[in-house]
Structures are given as structure tokens and as C-alpha cells.
Amino acid sequence: MISCVYCNGAHERPADVRRCWADHGGADAPAASPESPAADPRVAGADVPPDTVPSAGSRAVVALRRGPPGLGRHVVVAAGQPAPGEWAAAERIRVDAAALADPAATATRLRTATAGVVIELAGDGEFDPPPAAAAARAPDE
């Protein structure tokens, strides 16, 4: 199914979406209302579903979906943070000073995980803080 911004429904084929576009006068897709950013779950502080978790840096809020277990999607959480709902029963791998002392063992556990795991980053200061500013160079430099 293809989500349709013209009727807020879904269509089976691209031709059906084109027909819906024509039925709505061939107008551009309606823009999000700038006066209601709280309706957008990507906006920090917005009202979001329960399985929506703030990032460890608390800069953004994202809706987390695990997808099929065979994809092996992992999730990263801060130390002590509960796992999102879809990962509640998943194996938890803590990355702390001990894991950094033997990175090969941790990498092997991550590489051999057949279903998604919860990666818990220790908060004891083993990691460098994020950079204060991003590089202004072009990506190909």
C-alpha cells in the first residue's frame, strides 16, 4: 500500500495515487501546519506515543519501530534507560570500560546477534563528549 497525502488514505498502485492527485485538482500536497509543531513526533517535547523515546542527547524525539526480527535492528540507550517496548525482551549488551577493554568480544556478540539487541552505553565518562561544532567542509573533502 502507498500512503496518499491527498486523501490521507492509501492506494495499491502509483496509478491510483496519480488519479487521487487529479481528483484533488492536481494541487501540491498539503503542507504541514506551521502553527502545530506538537503534532509532529519528530519535534522535541511533542506529545508522542509511549514507544517514542528521546535520544540520549535529548535533542530529538523519534518513533522507534523494530521491524521484522530477522533484520536484527538494534537500539542504543543510555545507562539505566529502559528499552523501548518492541525491544523489552531483547538481549541487553552493556558497553562500558570492561567492554572497551575487550572490544573483540563485544563486537562478536553484536555481529552474531540474530535478532535486535539493546546496546546500553555506560554513563561513567568512558566516551568522549560530542563535538561542540560540526565541520564546515564539504563531505567529499
Image (cartoon, helix red, strand yellow):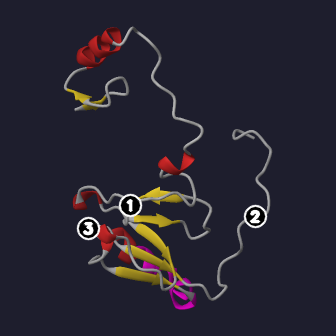
Contact flag, marks 3 and 1 (Cβ < 8 Å): no
Q: Label 2, label 3: how many angstroms apart (C-alpha)?
A: 33 Å
Name the amino acid type tagged 3: Thr
**Dot 3 crowding, Cα within 10 Å, few <14, some 14–19, many 20+:** few
Q: Residue at x 56, y 46 (%)?
A: 37
Give the mark, 1 or 2, whose residue is nearer the N terminus: 1
Q: Label 1, label 2: how many angstroms apart (C-alpha)?
A: 31 Å
Q: Position of residue 109 (x, y in %)?
A: 36, 77
Question: Label 1: which residue?
Answer: 49
Give the mark, 3 or 1, whose residue is nearer the N terminus: 1
Based on the displayed image, in which of its 4 quarters is residue 1 positioned? top left
Q: Is residue 4 left or right of 136 when viewed as pictured?
A: left
Q: Is residue 12 left or right of 104 when viewed as pictured?
A: left
Q: Is residue 138 left or right of 71 when viewed as pictured?
A: right
Based on the displayed image, in which of its 4 quarters is residue 110 positioned? bottom left
Question: Label 2: which residue?
Answer: 131
Name the amino acid type tagged 2: Pro
**Dot 1 crowding, Cα within 10 Å, few <14, some 14–19, many 20+:** few
Helix, strand or loop for disc 3: loop
Question: Label 3: which residue?
Answer: 114
Q: Label 3, label 1: how many angstroms apart (C-alpha)?
A: 27 Å
Magenta-colored segment: predominant secondary structure:
helix
Q: Residue at x 47, y 25 (%)?
A: 30
Helix, strand or loop for disc 1: loop
**Rendered-image quadrant of the C terminus:** top right
Compared to residue 28, the image places residue 2 above or below, namely below
Q: Is residue 67 magenta?
A: no
Magenta stretch? 97-107
